[in-house]
Image (spheres, rainbow, N blue to C red):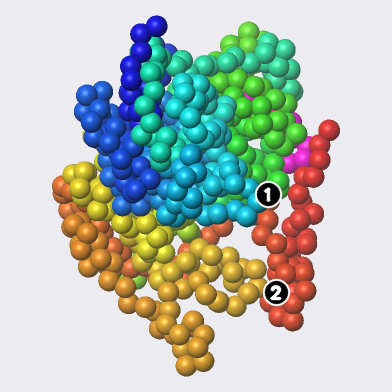
Amino acid sequence: MSTERLTVGQALVKFLAAQYTERDGKEQRLIKGTWGIFGHGNVAGLGQALQELGPEVDMPYYRSQNEQGQVHIAAAFAKHSNRLSTFACTASVGPGSTNMITGAALATVNRLPVLLLPSDFFANRIPDPVLQQVEHPTEHDVSLNDCFRPVSRFYSRISRADQLMHALPEAMRVLTDPVETGAVVLSLPQDVQTEAFDFPSSMFEKRVWRIRRPPAEAEMIAETVKRLKKAKKPFIVCGGGVKYSGASQALAEFAEAFGIPVGETQAGKGALSWDHPMSMSAVGALGVTSANTLVEEADFVLAVGTRLGDFTTGSKTTFPASATMVGLNVASLDAHKLFALPLIADAKTGLEQLSSALTEAGYKGASDARRKDIAKRKAAWEANVDEIIRVKEPEDLAQGEVIGMVNEIFTGDATMINAAGSMPGDLAKLWRPSFEHSYHLEYGYSCMGYEIPAGIGVKMADPKRKVVVMIGDGSYLMMNSEIVTAVAEGLDLTIVVVDNHGFQSIHGLQRSVGSPSFGNELRFRDKSRALSGDYIPIDFKAHAASMGAHAVFTKTEDEFRKALEAAKKGKGVQVVVVEVNPEKRVGGYAFGGWWDTPIAEVSEQKSVKSARKQYDEAKKKQVLFKS
C-alpha cells in the first residue's frame, strides 16, 4: 500500500481539500477554506500545515478577530450555499476553543454544517496541566472541549494519529447528511497535531459525497392526498428546508396550481417571492393578518421543511386543534412534530411526488371564490405594509420606516441579514424578498452578534450580490470586531446600525409582562444608582470608522436615504448609523397565535398580577395532545 508520511495537521489539510459534494449533477468543494486564530495549541500543528500545504492543495486560510465570529461566518456561508459547502474553523486550546461553543450551538440548532477543529491538552499528559487547561479532580481525561458534546452532531477527540483515518470519513458523513448535519467537532490535542504517521495515499484522493434526496413512501403520499382532498381550507407552512433542498420553484408551482396559501417561517421567508399570489408572509407569533387569519380557519396544514419552532407554532396555539397536520420533512424528528402525519422526504422530491399524486387523483384545488378571498387578504396586508413603512415624521424615524427604505433602495434582490432583537419580528412582517436568498435571518438560536460575521459569510458565498447587514445597537456591541475582517478581505458590505438605545425588543417584552423598565436600555445610573439616567451617548460612527469602515451618522429621512444610496454605490465596508425612536414600534398581528413567556405566579405588583391573569387565559389555547 502506497503511503505518505505526514503530520496529523498536514494529513487533515490534504484530506479536507479533496472532499466534494454533489447534488443534481453539480459538484462543489465541501470545505472551501479554513478560518482560524492561532495560539500555542495550534500554531505549530495545524497552523504549520496550513502555511506549508494550504497553497499547494488550494486550502486558503482566513483570519477572524473572534473565534465565535469565525463559526458564524462558516454557518452563514453554509446557509447561503444551501448546505452544500462550508468552512473549517481552528482555534487554540482553552478560551480560543470554548469561544466557538456558541457558534457550534447555532449551527446545530439551525441544522447547518460547520467543521470545528478546537485544540486540546497534550494527549501524552506529560505537560500537565498545560497552559489554559482546566483540571478535573476525578476525571483525568475530561477537557474543556467536552463542552462541545451537547451542541455538536458529531464529536471525536483524536488522541492517536491513526485515529484520523476513521474519524474523518465519519465527520464528512455527518456534515453532508441533510438529516444529521450541524456542528462537527474534531478535538485535536496539540501534541498529536504535530505527530507523523504513514497515511495511505488513497486517503487523499478526491471523494464526492452525494447529497441524498429521499422520496416519501407511496403509502404516506396516498394518505396525504386522501386527507387533502377532504380539506376545504388547506394551508402551507414554508420552512428553511425548502431553500436548502432547492425546492422554491417546486413550492411556487405547487401552491399556485392548487391555490393553497403559504405562510413563512423566519428561515423559509424568501422561498416564495413576496409578489407570488399565494405568498401570505409570516405566520405565527411574529406573523401577519394575511397568514394568521387564513391559518386560524385552516382544516389542513402542510408543514414543509420546517423545524416548527415556538414562534411559528405560537407555542402550540397557531394551528387549530381540529386541523389535520402533515409534516413534509427529510428529518423524522421534524416530520412528526405537532402530532403530524409524517411525510418523510426531501422537500423538493416530496412536493413533486405530492403534486403528481394530486393531479392523478383529479384534485382541482381552490375554487375561484377561494382564490379571490386569498388575494383580497394578501392585498389588504400589503396595503398595511405600505402604511407602516411610509415615513410620517422625517426627523423622528421609526424602525419599520427604516426597514422600508432599506428594502426600497437595495431592493428585494439584495441579501438582507439579521438575527436578534426587535428587527426579526419587524422584518418578518415588512421585508419584501424577491428570491430565495434575499432574506437571511438566523432565528433558531437568535444569536446576538451573528449579523456582521454572517455578512462576511454570505458575501463570500455570493460575491456579486449586494449584502446588507441590519443590526441593532445592542447586538452591534457584541461582535463588531469582524468589521476588521471584512475590511482586511476587501469585501463590499453595507451595515445598517439601528440605534434605539439598547435592548428595546426585550424591553418591550419586559413591560408587556407587567414588569417596570429595568436593565435593558443603555443608560447611566441616576442618583439612586438605578440604571434609569440619561442615554449613554455612543458614537457608533467613530467606532466603525476606527476599524477601517466608511461610516456616517443619520437621523432624518433625507440623511438616511442619501447615506443608503451612497453605501449602495460605495466600495468596501459601509456603515450607516441611524437613530430611531424606540417607542415607535410595529404592532403585533398574531391573532389566535401567541408566544409562551411565563410570568411570575406570585407578585405584589398589580401590573404583574394582571399580566399573569392574561397569561393563564392564553395558555388554555395550547394544543397539548392530538391522537
531 left or right of 328 in image: left
- Viewport quadrant of the C terminus: top right
The residue where tag 2 is placed is 608
The magenta span reads 320-328
**How far from the left and from the top, in percent, is residue 7?**
35, 28
Q: Residue sitting at 17 percent across and 53 percent down?
A: 566
Secondary structure beneath dot 1 equals loop
Does 309 appear in magenta? no
Residue located at (53% from left, 69% from top): 507
Residue 123 location, x and y as percent?
48, 39
In the rendered image of this protein, does residue 35 appear above or below residue 529? above
Residue at (36%, 13%) from the top-left corner?
Answer: 3
Q: Position of residue 420 (x, y in %)?
A: 47, 55
Decide: marks 2, 1 in contact (CB < 8 A)?
no
Q: Secondary structure at mark 2?
A: helix
Mark 2 and mark 1 lie on one chain; the one further toward the N terminus is: 1
In the picture of the structure, the residue carrying the numbered disc 1 is 315
Q: Tag 1: Cα neighbours inside 10 Å, few (<14), some, or many (≥20)?
A: many
Q: Is residue 302 visible?
A: no
For the N terminus, give its image quadrant: top left
Under mark 2, the amino acid is Val
Q: Position of residue 492 (x, y in %)?
A: 21, 45
Residue placed furthest toward the right: 627
Compare residues 452 and 58 and report the one nearer the observer: 58
